[in-house]
Amino acid sequence: MKFKNAIVKKPAKTILKGITTADLGKPDYQKALKQHQEYVNTLKECGVKVEVLKADEKYPDSTFVEDPAVLTKECAIITNPGADSRKGETKDIKKAVKRYYKNSVYEIDPPATLEGGDIMQVDDHFYIGISDRTNKKGAKQLLTYLNFHGYTGDIVEFKGILHLKTGMSYIGNNTILITDLLADKDIFADFNKIKVNKEEAYAANCIRINDFVIIPAGFPETKKAIEKAGFKTKTVDVSEFRKIDGGLSCLSLRF
Ligand code: CIR
């Protein structure tokens, strides 16, 4: 898939209060800002134009713009995040997304919930994770919009990770990065799999942007495996975002 644009949002000072299950301490705000800038630079190096939205102090997790929207070539879907503290993030994202998608913008309506981290696109097909944040109603609503625009989708159930893409990523050429937790699912049987071991599980969340796979710094085995499979990589340090369960994909909307 060719991407031309990305939307990101500057981390807020309140990022220290972001939701977390990790035991890695609090993010350092200045360091987070620096890492965010490096992330933006890397996206640009991959050939996309990056719109940087202003930080929103009201929402500690608002730098994770992937969750309040799902963007495709044809349409945009504004989600209803399952985390209460994140529901209000959609307002600002909707404004930004409307500038690109005009009238092709849909919304997930309660009681349906959905977060973009649960959505993995593989060409014209979408895998939709059912998690603590995304419910079946949310998946069904999303599928209705996607089907209308000619896309297909499958629901994937799992337990033990935040979002579907916490445990896997599609990196192109029919290849997925995948952790043990998801690797045995029949639904992924036909993919070439790069298994990500337990110690490096965080690196299962990577993003393919045009000619490159962007990977988090500090996971040498996964980097080696991705390069051995023939992909070119770029590395970004996102340690401060990891402290509040954020990965590489959640820091941008790519389209
Ligand atoms: C949260 O728990 O919602 C944030 N602290 C992390 C969100 C990560 N988003 C993503 O992986 N798409």
Image (spheres, rainbow, N blue to C red):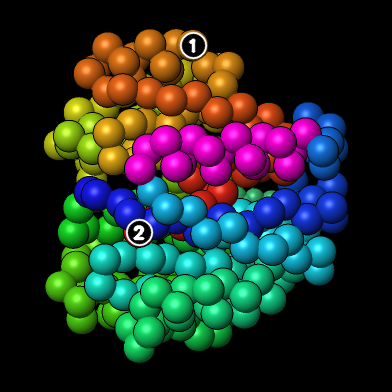
Looking at the rendered structure, which numbered label has been put on residue 220?
Answer: 1
User: Which residue appears at 62% of the width and 79% of the height?
Assistant: 91
Residue that protrudes farthest toward the bottom in the picture: 103
> Which residue type carries mark 1?
Pro
The answer to which of 174 and 188 lies nearer the viewer is 174
**Helix, strand, or loop for circle 1?**
helix
Magenta residues, start to end: 31-47
Identify whether 22 is placed above or below 139. above
150 within the magenta span: no
Q: Nearer the viewer, residue 183 or 91?
A: 91
Amino acid on which the number 2 mark rests in the picture: Phe
Q: Quadrant of residue 34?
A: top right
Among numbered discs 2 and 1, the one appearing first in the sequence: 1
Distance between the alpha carbons at the discs numbered 2 and 1: 28 Å
Look at the picture and state if 40 lies above or below 138: above
The percent coordinates of residue 183 (x first, y second) are 34, 32
Q: Which mark is residue 255?
A: 2
